[in-house]
Each structure stands twice: as C-alpha cells, then as structure tokens.
Amino acid sequence: MKIPVIDYLLESEDYVPFDPQKHDKLHFNMCRLVKDEIRSHKWIEAEKGRILPWREAVAEWMDQYYDQFIEAIIPQKRLMKFLERQSRNCRDALKDVVKAL
C-alpha cells in the first residue's frame, strides 16, 4: 500500500529526500512547504517557552493553520475546478458500479 506523501513527510521532523520513482514533484514540494511551516510553528512556540513534540506540533498546526495555508497558495478558482472534476469522476464511477449491478 502506498503511503500518501504528506503522511510520509510528516512522520518525523527529519529531512526526507525526493524520490522520483515514488513522488510527484509538485505534491512533494507542497508537502515540504507544509513541513517547513510546522517547523516554524514549533520554533515560535519554543520561543514562547512551550516545547512541542513533533507529532503534537503537526496536529496543532494542521488544526489551526492548514486551511489558511492552502487558501493562500492555491487559487480558489483552481481548487473549485479540481473539486468539480473529482466529483464528476466519482459520479461517473458510481454510474459504472450501478450499471454493473
């Protein structure tokens, strides 16, 4: 089973090399940006005297900042087109399943 890139990258705070056999470069780089933001969040919290373990920093950042981050880097029109395309694909796949029954 293939592990999603974001899960693969966020398993630890360590650097993860890009593997062209396993990863899509754009998605991998987006995930790296997320990881960098989480590191920054962890550092800011440490400056305040709050030491966060990596997994806690990931969970906290995802809850508090992920949506804003995605909105800032992905234009809304592009996101809506992507979601429409995905919903069409799902609808078409369901039609095929119903026909097979």
Image: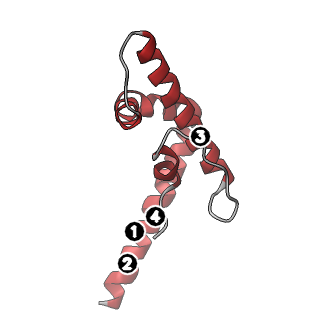
Label 4 or label 3, whichever lies nearer to me, is: 3
- Is residue 53 among what the camera can see? yes
Check residue 32 in the rendering and tell me which mark sits there, or answer none: 3
Left or right, 62 with respect to 79, comes to: left
Q: Nearer the viewer, residue 64 or 21?
A: 21
Badge count: 4
Label 3 sits on what residue type? Arg
Secondary element at image label 3 = helix
- Looking at the rendering, in which quadrant would you find the N terminus? bottom left
The answer to the question of whether label 1 and label 4 lie on touching residues, with beta carbons closer than 8 A, is yes
Q: Nearer the viewer, residue 101 or 39?
A: 39
- Separation (CA) of disc 2 from disc 3: 37 Å
Q: Nearer the viewer, residue 23 or 76?
A: 23
- Separation (CA) of disc 1 from disc 3: 32 Å
- Separation (CA) of disc 1 from disc 2: 6 Å
Secondary element at image label 2 = helix
Secondary element at image label 4 = helix
Q: Earlier in the sequence, mark 2 or mark 3?
A: 3
Identify residue for label 2: 95
Q: Badge 3 local density, few (<14 within 10 Å), some, or many (20+)?
A: some
Secondary element at image label 1 = helix
Label 1 sits on what residue type? Arg
- Separation (CA) of disc 1 from disc 4: 5 Å
Identify residue for label 1: 91
Label 1 or label 3, whichever lies nearer to me, is: 3
Q: Nearer the viewer, residue 87 or 64?
A: 64
Left or right, 54 with respect to 36, comes to: left
Quadrant location of residue 46? top left
The answer to the question of whether label 1 and label 2 lie on touching residues, with beta carbons closer than 8 A, is yes
Label 4 sits on what residue type? Arg
Identify residue for label 4: 88
